[in-house]
Amino acid sequence: MRYAFFIISCFLLFSCSDSFIKHKLKYEKIGTCSEVPESIKMLANINGVRYEFYRCLDDGFDGKNYTVERSGDSVFVNFQKTATGGQSLYKLILDVDAKPPYNHIILDGRHVAIRATVN
């Protein structure tokens, strides 16, 4: 019985991981998709990295139709689009906090260079 408790305790201790990825998206509908700014602003601090960019998304975008996944030292952010319905221009502000730190982020297929220092 003592050995079983020791083995279970060791398993729980060594299986704990302090790696995580947290994200929060703020969005604002701007207008039509006639001209989409290509710039991506980035601000890094001790709480993570904030990305500000523009995308053409479905008119009914509700802030839930996107995924954030980690693979190795990269973070992939993808926005689902439907073939039906119209699209509008949205201003998106994405906050990403991850441990261990990531070296690459791909925002909807576009690689963003991460060279900012922590303020």
Image (spheres, rainbow, N blue to C red):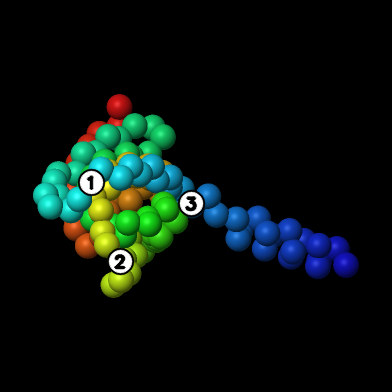
Residue on which disc 1 sits: 31
Q: Nearer the viewer, residue 67 or 20?
A: 67
Frontmost of labels 2 and 3 is 2
Amino acid at pointer 2: Gly
Q: Earlier in the sequence, mark 3 or mark 1?
A: 3
Q: Where is residue 73 drawn, in percent x and y?
A: 32, 57
The secondary structure type at the circle numbered 1 is: strand
Q: CA distance from mark 1 to mark 2?
A: 15 Å
Q: Is residue 99 visible?
A: no
Q: Is residue 102 visible?
A: yes
Distance from disc 3 to disc 1, alpha carbons, whole Å, reads 35 Å
The residue tagged 2 is 85
Q: Amino acid at mark 3?
A: Phe
Q: Position of residue 41 (x, y in %)?
A: 21, 39
Residue 95 point in image, percent of width and height:
37, 42
The residues bearing labels 2 and 3 have C-alpha atoms spaced at a distance of 35 Å
Earlier-in-chain disc, 1 versus 2: 1
The amino acid type found where label 1 is placed reads Gly
Disc 1 to disc 2: CB gap under 8 Å: no
Q: Is residue 17 left or right of residue 85?
A: right
Residue placed furthest toward the right: 1
Residue furthest bottom in the image: 83
Name the residue rendered at 85%, 63% in the picture. Answer: 2
**In front: 12, or 92?**
92
Give the left or right position of residue 36, taking residue 93 as reference.
Answer: left
Q: Which mark is residue 20?
A: 3
Quarter of the image for residue 57 reads bottom left
Q: Nearer the viewer, residue 17 or 11?
A: 17
